[in-house]
Amino acid sequence: MTNKLMIANLKMNLEKTDISNYIKKLNNHTNNKNIVICPTSIYIPYFLKQEYSVGLQNVFYEENGAYTGEISPTQAKSMGIEYVIIGHSERRKYFNETNYIINKKIKKSLDSNLKIILCVGETTKEKNFSKTKKLLKKQIVEALKGIKDLDNLIIAYEPVWAIGTNIIPTEQDIKNVIDYIKNILKDMKVLYGGSINESNVENLKQIDNVDGFLIGGSSTNIDKFLKIIDIIYE
Ligand code: PGA
């Protein structure tokens, strides 16, 4: 069986009753630690201690203190959470997360031994001006400034224009960009994310340098998500 990683980013979706149904079906179907569920934080306790892994969608860069509404890497680790998504484009866009802030979050999370999924990706405008590679390099270099041990780091390449739009890059473009990232960071695991669904995942999984997937919208519907799991791990 493939050891590709599959990260489900449920974002701010689903309510308590949806979650019980989701978990029931997921638990019956899945015993693979390479599947990482990142639910809205308040639901995390329901997902813990199962055969899959659990991640946070975001984290703060201080260990404790008067930071209303935030969750620290040490708190996450103490709950048994293994992964954290950092630098998602929605965090960058709606919460003004800069590469500098992302760098602080990564450093603190590494101190707590969390596995980090660092999201990078270009906007439509950057793509149209052929700035993709330059932008990705900047995001990566600034996010990883001063960090030497990259063992617990995974990059997710998520073109902003492909998130939630049903538009995906060509397979060749994904391959080229991932090659480019792997040239900057040797031996790095790189995932693809953006509008993955049960119809396109079969082709996406054929791209030989993709180490896994970050799935948003299609992971919020458990039936669709289980189909995608089956396709990836068949
Ligand atoms: P999407 O989201 O699968 O809905 O495009 C991906 C993501 O934001 O990680």
Image (cartoon, rainbow, N blue to C red):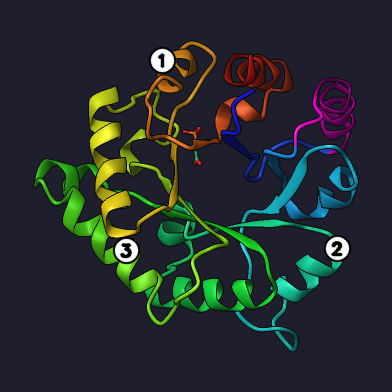
Name the spot of residue 175 as percent of width and height, x first: 29, 33
Give the residue at x 55% y 73%. Answer: 105
Which secondary structure, mark 3?
Answer: helix
Label 2 sits on residue: 79
Q: Secondary structure at mark 2?
A: helix
Q: Position of residue 3 (x, y in %)?
A: 60, 33
| Number of numbered discs visible in the structure rendering | 3
C-alpha gap between disc 3 and disc 2:
30 Å
Highlighted range, magenta: 16-32
The kind of residue tagged 2 is Met
> Of the residues under marks 1 and 2, which one precedes in the sequence?
2
Q: Are marks 3 and 2 in contact (CB under 8 Å)?
A: no
Quick check: 44 left or right of 133? right
Q: Which residue occupies 84% across, 59% down? A: 80
- The tag on residue 203 is 1
Q: Does residue 136 sit above or below 208 in this rendering?
A: below
Mark 3 crowdedness (10 Å alpha carbons): few <14, some 14-19, many ≥20:
many
Disc 3 residue type?
Gln
Q: In the figure, 77 relative to 17: above or below?
A: below
Residue 135 shown left or right of residue 11 in the figure: left
Regarding residue 60, the answer to whether it shows in the image is no
Q: Which mark is residue 48?
A: none
Q: Is residue 36 placed above or below 87 in the rendered structure?
A: above
Q: Mark 1 and mark 2 in contact? Answer it, CB < 8 Å.
A: no
Q: Residues within 10 Å of mark 1 (few under 14, many from 20)?
A: few
| Residue at x 87% of width, y 48% of height | 48
Magenta residue check for 19: yes
Q: Which amino acid does the dot numbered 1 rest on?
A: Asn
Q: Which residue is mark 3?
A: 139
Q: Residues within 10 Å of mark 2 (few under 14, many from 20)?
A: few
Q: Residue at x 63, y 20 (%)?
A: 233
